[in-house]
Image: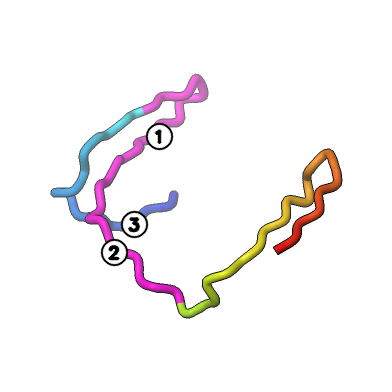
Amino acid sequence: MIHRGFPESQVSQVCVKLEPSGRIHVIFLVEEPETQEQASKEPKKAVGVDLGIARLTTLYL
């Protein structure tokens, strides 16, 4: 069993699932307050390459 505490006032939905084996799963949807993103200290320029592409692509920046 895995568990952890959470504030009950933030629970917005509860789902209970009963499996054919008799196991019961309880799922809680908990809303958390939004947090503001902080500026990154990393360089602003970046290049990403997808290695799962089907055709070769050349990038020039």
Name the secondary structure under disc 1.
strand
Q: Residue 21 appears at what percent x and percent y?
A: 51, 24
Which residue is at the front of the view, 39 or 24? 39
Q: Residues within 10 Å of mark 1 (few under 14, many from 20)?
A: few
Q: Where 39 sits versus 15, above or below?
A: below
Q: Return the mark for residue 25.
A: 1
Q: Residue at x 35, y 36 (%)?
A: 26
Q: Residue at x 81, y 54 (%)?
A: 58
Q: Identity of the amino acid at label 3?
A: Arg
Residue ranking furthest to the top:
20
Which residue is at the front of the view, 22 or 31? 31
Q: Where 32 sits versus 29, above or below?
A: below
Q: Which residue is mark 3?
A: 4
Q: Where 34 sits versus 37, above or below?
A: above
Name the secondary structure under disc 2.
loop
Q: How many numbered circles does the render carry?
A: 3
Q: Is residue 24 magenta?
A: yes
Residue 33 located left or right of residue 26? left
Residue 56 located left or right of residue 9? right
Q: Residue at x 27, y 34 (%)?
A: 14
Residue ranking furthest to the bottom:
41
Mark before the other along the chain sequence, 1 or 3? 3
Which residue is at the front of the view, 43 or 61? 61
Query: Main structural element of the magenta stretch: helix, strand or loop?
Result: loop
Inter-mark Cα distance, 3 to 2: 25 Å
Inter-mark Cα distance, 2 to 1: 33 Å
